Image (cartoon, grey):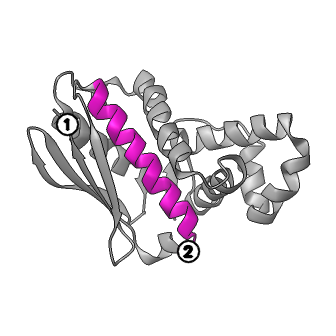
Amino acid sequence: MKQVKGPWIQDYVKMVKSFLKDSPEKKAEFEELLETKDWDIINSFVVPTEYYDYDSFQRIGRAVFIVIAQSNLQAVQAYGGIMIEYLLKFYKRVLVEEEPIETLQRFIGFHTSYFQAVDSHTEMMYCSETNAIIKLKLVDSDKQYPEASKAFAYQLAGSFVKLAELAGAKNIQIKIQEDHGGNYVYNISWD
């Protein structure tokens, strides 16, 4: 069974709860996008050390992207940086000061370990002192919600940029490309 560890779904759940508290009239929009078991997760306490259904993670993430972020990829990318700051409070070993490449490599390993039985993954394709090329490889089943896949790809981009920055990189640039297979390639460079 495909699963995701709590921290990856926890913020989505918090966002949905907070948004519906402030805008209860938007619940119908969420209901069009979510299933009963997704609501069970949203209405529960998400435990960071537990694993949750991966398909629910995708649907909740898609709903957050469409309803809350209004399909704004820049907002999702910015959120990726915010999420990293939150995660680093608990997973400090991911960050290596003055070592952007090592930090990115640790995050890739960390990120991959938080998804069980999920064939999609991130991998470092190339790195030098001031550049990294990372690929988010998606399998067909993860492409069933293309807007969720794209939003997740942009969220990761924001995470990569924030990690490089926190590790000491300056003047960070990132280019995101979707390849012909529906995977995402990130070219990150810095001074």
Q: Nearer the viewer, residue 108 or 176?
A: 176
Looking at the image, can residue 190 be seen? yes
Name the N-terminal-most of marks 2 and 1: 2
Q: Which mark is residue 190?
A: 1
Q: Quadrant of the C terminus?
A: top left
- Residue drawn at x 38%, y 64% is 120
Kind of residue at badge 2: Gln
Our reading of the magenta stretch's main secondary structure is helix
Q: Which mark is residue 144?
A: 2
Kind of residue at badge 1: Trp
Q: Residues within 10 Å of mark 2 (few under 14, many from 20)?
A: few
Q: Position of residue 6 (x, y in %)?
A: 55, 41
Looking at the image, can residue 114 be seen? no
In magenta stretch: residue 145: yes
Establish if 164 lies above or below 117: above
Image-quadrant location for residue 37: bottom right
In magenta stretch: residue 34: no
Q: Is residue 65 left or right of residue 122?
A: right
Q: Residues within 10 Å of mark 1 (few under 14, many from 20)?
A: some
- Residue drawn at x 58%, y 69% is 145
Foreground mark, 2 or 1, reads 1
Query: Helix, strand, or loop for circle 1?
Result: loop
For the magenta stretch, what is the residue range?
Answer: 144-166
Q: Which mark is residue 127?
A: none
Image-quadrant location for residue 10: top right
- Residue drawn at x 68%, y 42% is 13
Which residue is at the far left?
128
Q: Nearer the viewer, residue 165 or 173?
A: 173
Q: Position of residue 79 (x, y in %)?
A: 52, 38
